[in-house]
Amino acid sequence: MTANHPPASTPWTPLSPESLAECPLAADDRSVHLWLLRGGRHDPRLRGLVARYAGLAAADLQPSIGPHGKPYLDGHALRFNLSHSGDWTVLALGFGCELGVDIEHARRVRRRSALLERCFTDAERVRLAHGGDRGLLRYWAAKEALVKAIGRGIAYGLKQIEIAECADGQV
């Protein structure tokens, strides 16, 4: 699935954060909701969305930070994760599963060789050798989302995780 052309079976429903009167997920719903917002890391809509999904007023939201930087709500079943890049933020929310997301805006990757050596396995470096920065950023985002989901962050060591490609070239 690509961001520009989701499969027809994917239930994409564009909404504005302000249109939510209450949490659109029940605690027993296993769906994951993703919000792509144009706005920086201090966008007040982020706090408002997490609060609505948690059933709280934004002023009452008291997020905590885990030992490796993952945000959570103490004593609450709601799980969420977010990432910022450039003017964009992605926010994932759900119940009953740990979540990790990453977003990377298209850019030139500096110190590409050092990054490949430090954070990518031999097999990944072979696959990325002839690709451009876009492919490297796709792999990076997949790896970072995974380590964020397990609550460890980049300190876990991105080289410990190997991303495989599907037959259609998607990671």
Image (cartoon, helix red, strand yellow):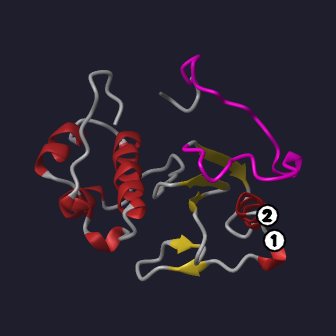
Which of the marked residues, 2 or 1, is nearer the chain's N terminus? 2
Question: Mark 2 highlights which residue?
Answer: 48
Residue most toward the front? Answer: 28
Q: Nearer the viewer, residue 14 or 132?
A: 14
> Horizontally, is 57 left or right of 98 in the view?
right
Examine the structure image and report whether residue 151 is included in the region drawn in magenta.
Answer: no
Residue most toward the left? Answer: 122
Q: Is residue 171 above or below residue 51?
A: above
> Horizontally, is 34 left or right of 23 in the view?
left
Q: Is residue 24 above or below residue 62?
A: above
Residue at figure coordinates x 21%, y 55% from the top left: 120
Question: Mark 1 highlights which residue?
Answer: 58
Count every numbered label the image shows and give the total. Answer: 2
Inspect the image, locate mark 2, and give the three-letter code of the amino acid beneath it.
Answer: Gly
Examine the structure image and report whether residue 28 is included in the region drawn in magenta.
Answer: yes
Residue at figure coordinates x 36%, y 52% from the top left: 140
Residue at figure coordinates x 20%, y 37% from the top left: 127
Inspect the image, locate mark 1, and give the three-letter code of the amino acid beneath it.
Answer: Ala
Characterize the local packing of mark 2: few (<14), some (14-19) or many (20 or more) Cα atoms within 10 angstroms: some
Segment colored magenta? 6-30
Image location of residue 145, percent across then percent down = 42, 55
Q: Residue 104: which disc?
A: none
Image quadrant of residue 150?
A: bottom left
Under circle 2, the secondary element is helix
Image location of residue 167, percent across then percent down = 26, 22
Quarter of the image where the C terminus is located = top left
Q: Is residue 28 above or below residue 58?
A: above
Q: Are marks 2 and 1 in contact (CB under 8 Å)?
A: yes
Q: Nearer the viewer, residue 103 or 73?
A: 73
